[in-house]
Amino acid sequence: MNVLIKGMEMPKSCGNCPMCHSNAEYDYAYCCVSSAETSGNKIPSGCPLIPVPPHGRLIDSDVLAMEMMDAANADQALAMVDDAPTVIEAEGRARHDQISEGLLG
């Protein structure tokens, strides 16, 4: 399972990351998530943190797909999307709302 920390921006370097712990006595810094030694001035390629881009409401599409097998028409399918349990709340204006208002293709 993964964890989302709401309000946390992707750090620009290990030195700016709240997951980085440094030991000044031994001039050593490590990542509290991966336990790897950190460089302090960049994000290493194996960093366990990943940015989450702005997005609409995130749902479990696998569960929804199984439920939609019984949908009789497009209106019923859209209602199922609207009623699907939210995994992560939308960030910014939801794309679904923009489509509903005819703002996207």
Image (cartoon, helix red, strand yellow):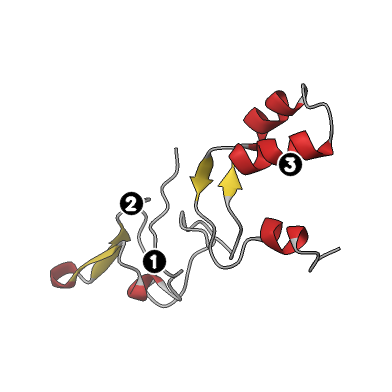
Q: Please tell me which residue lies in front, 36 or 99.
A: 99
Q: Where is mark 2, residue-wise?
A: 35
Marked residue nearer the N-terminal end (2 or 1): 1
Q: Compute the Cα span from label 1 to label 3.
A: 30 Å
Q: Are marks 2 and 3 in contact (CB under 8 Å)?
A: no
Within 10 Å of disc 2 (Cα), the crowding (few <14, some 14-19, many 20+) is: few
| Left or right of 66, for residue 20 | left
Observer-side mark, 2 or 1, equals: 1
Within 10 Å of disc 3 (Cα), the crowding (few <14, some 14-19, many 20+) is: some
Marked residue nearer the N-terminal end (1 or 3): 1
Residue type at tag 2: Ser
SS at circle 1: loop
* Residue at the image position 43 percent from the left and 70 percent from the top: 9
Q: Compute the Cα span from label 2 to label 1.
A: 23 Å
Residue type at tag 3: Leu
Residue 29 pos. (x, y %): 28, 66
* Residue at the image position 35 percent from the left and 60 percent from the top: 37
SS at circle 3: helix
SS at circle 2: loop
Residue 27 pos. (x, y %): 22, 72
Tally of marks: 3
* Residue at the image position 39 percent from the left and 60 percent from the top: 6
Residue 76 pos. (x, y %): 75, 34
Q: Where is mark 3, residue-wise?
A: 78
Q: Compute the Cα span from label 2 to label 3.
A: 44 Å
Marked residue nearer the N-terminal end (2 or 3): 2
| Left or right of 52, for residue 29 | left
| Left or right of 46, for residue 78 | right
Observer-side mark, 2 or 3, equals: 3
Q: Please tell me which residue lies in front, 37 or 67.
A: 67
The numbered mark at residue 7 is: 1
